[in-house]
Every structure is written in C-alpha cells, then in structure tokens.
Amino acid sequence: MIAWRAGVVVECGARWDGAREARVALEGEDRTVRALAYPHLVGELEPGARVLLNVTALVRGLGTGGYALVVARTDALPADAPDGPGHLVKARYTPLQAMVLGVDDQESPHHDALRDADDLGGMPVVVADLHSALPAVLAGARAEAVRRGRALRVAYVMTDGGALPAWFSRAVAGLRDAGWLDACVTTGQAFGGDLEAVTVHTGLLAARHVVGADLAVVAQGPGNLGTGTRWGFSGVAAGEAVNAAGVLRGRPVASLRVSGADARERHLGVSHHSLTAYGRVALVPADVPVPVLAGLPGTPEDLAAEGDAGAWSSLARRVAEQAAGLAEPHGRHRVHDVPADAPLLDALRTSPVRLSTMGRGLDADPAAFIAAAVAGVHAVRLLG
C-alpha cells in the first residue's frame, strides 16, 4: 500500500503557510525527488537532514499528490509541541494523528458561542465539487461586491474528501495573503485551517458566528477522487454540504462543475458529479446559478472549429438543458440564469493564485471558471 524511501535533503525550496518543499537525494538511487514536508507535523528541514519518505503518489504518477511526502526525520526528533488546550484528534489512528484545538472544543474560547448555535441567519453558502473552484467563486463574489459597493468577509469551509492538510493548498495561502479570504475552517478529518471543526455543520456555524463571514464557500481540499462510476467520487459530499447549509437555515448555492474542454462525455457541459450530488444527494432546495455563456467573446480552444458564436451557443444549450433537470418539475432546486460577460472574465484574470482545473487553465477551459464565478456573483446578490 505504501512505497517507502529514505533520503537526504539536498536543498530546501519554497515555503508557504504550513508547508515546505525540498529536494531529496534518495538512498541507493542516483536521483533526487521533489518532496513536501509539513513542519508542524515533522519539524523543520535543512540541507543534510535525513528523512523517511512516502513516495506512493510519485511512483504512481498522480497529479495533485505527485510529491514525495516527508513522514519523519530519522536523524533528529522535533521538539514536543508546547502544552495547550485542545483535544480534537485529526487524521485519527494514523501514524501522523495530530491533536488540535477545535473551535467547538470545550476548551475553546468560542465554545459558548457555538454550544447552542443552530442558525446561519440566512448566510449564503456556495458549495462546489472541486477545490479549484474556490478562487473563481471568490473572483465572482468580489466583483459583484465591488459593483454593489459593499464589504465582504468570506470563509472557506474545507471538507475532508481531498487533501487532509489545508497546508497543501497554495491557493488557500495565496488567497489569504491577498485579502481575498478571511479564514479557512477545516472540518472532519481535514486539519490545518485557521479554525478546526468537528463537522461541516460546526464549520459553517464557526464561519458565521466566529469569523463573522457574510459568505461561506464549502469544497474539498485539493485532490478530487473519482472512479468513473455513478457514486464513486469524493464530490458526492457536495450534496451533503447543501443539506447542512439548508438544515442550519443558510442559503445554499450549488456551484455547477462545468467544462467545455473535457474529452470525457460524463464531464462535458455539466459534470455528472454535479448532477448526482445535487440531483440525488441534496435533499433541501438550493439555488443553482447557471452561466449564460452565449454572449461571451472568444471561444474555448477545443471548440474553435465550430466558430466563436457557435461554440459558446452549443455549450450554453447543453449546460442549460442539463441544469434544467435539477429544477422543478424534475428536481427540487431553483435555477437562476446569471449572465457571464467580458468583465467577469476580467475579474477571473485578477485572481492572485493560478486558476487551474484538471490541468487546464482559464484560457483552455473558461467555462469551468465562469460557472464557479457566477455562483459567487449570485451569492452576493442574495445579501441584498
């Protein structure tokens, strides 16, 4: 199940919140690999440090997880963490289980605020399948907030369907540094956020009552898992997040996973992930913003042969027809057409972090990011 290697750090590279890259020379092999360490778990690295690596994802050639991961230093133990409050254990019963202070923990200064909290007070909650939707949702929300002349506080509630450490996400670090994101709340087995929560429900309540967020975005961390089956994908949890937002009297906004460039039929237009999660798993009504694509300039690269207007119109029709199945009388949700225009594309280009989904950037698959952005636009409109 695990491919192990030992090695020596030859160079320390980029650092961002909670993570550090390094080049490690593998013992018994004439090569170095790119490795990632979480210093809060394994201690600091420096050249010459001897390390134990998990290289499973690297050996298998996975994309998002294609690092050698530092499991431990074998030449020096990090110091024990200072004594402090908190008894939530995350990554439970794994060798790297960590004890954290939960925002809803009895020892937390926020425990009293959350003990009987049961209501989001109508806070819009944008739910997305993929982590890559996060910066696009924020781009749309910020553009609409600026247009309305209002301030906006946003919390990201990270579920545990993808990466467990929030530290893995350069997007979260970059969005926070740029002031686009006010807090990250890690829920379930995910950890490393500004706040730790036991469930998506307490994560949402913390976003509202502790962070003071006007808007929350719920999505898994980097690293979507899918098997090409109807139910075997981690994004199923998006439907459960819609349920959590509705039960807590928030205003769930279901962001569609859309692609105009994916070669797989099940992901072209509206992905079957969205249709299953929102159509079958989500049991409370949600708003479903549908991007009106036909008025956009240019064309997705993969549809260029059809001509600009024809490409967008064809994709727009497909998306509209697929989304219609989520609304009455076929489904329980409310579909809202949201015009997508050149200014929205311009807003996406201002993202402080790289826009990339399934290896494609904004120019290669603009519909993917536009669909997420219109969810952000719609959520801010709900604020009035």
Image (cartoon, rainbow, N blue to C red):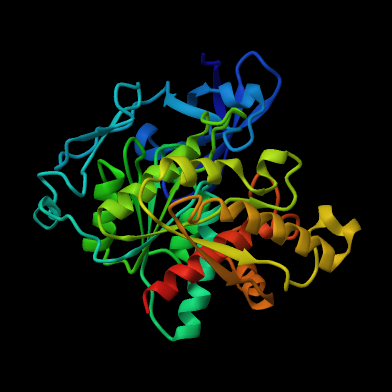
Q: Position of residue 225 (x, y in %)?
A: 54, 33
Q: Position of residue 298 (x, y in %)?
A: 80, 68
Residue 217's quadrant in the figure? bottom left
Q: Position of residue 215 (x, y in %)?
A: 37, 65
Residue 317's quadrant in the figure? bottom right
> Is 285 or 94 nearer to us in this picture?
285
Above or below: residue 260 compared with residue 87: below
Above or below: residue 21 compared with residue 58: below
User: Is 258 on the left-hand or right-hand side of 284?
Assistant: right
Which image quadrant: the C terminus?
bottom left
> Is 290 or 304 nearer to us in this picture?
290
- Looking at the image, how many numbered discs can be counted on the residues? 0
Above or below: residue 219 compared with residue 135: above
Q: Position of residue 165 (x, y in %)?
A: 41, 40
Q: Residue furthest bottom?
A: 149
> Is 255 or 16 nearer to us in this picture?
255
- The answer to whether one can see residue 179 in this image is no
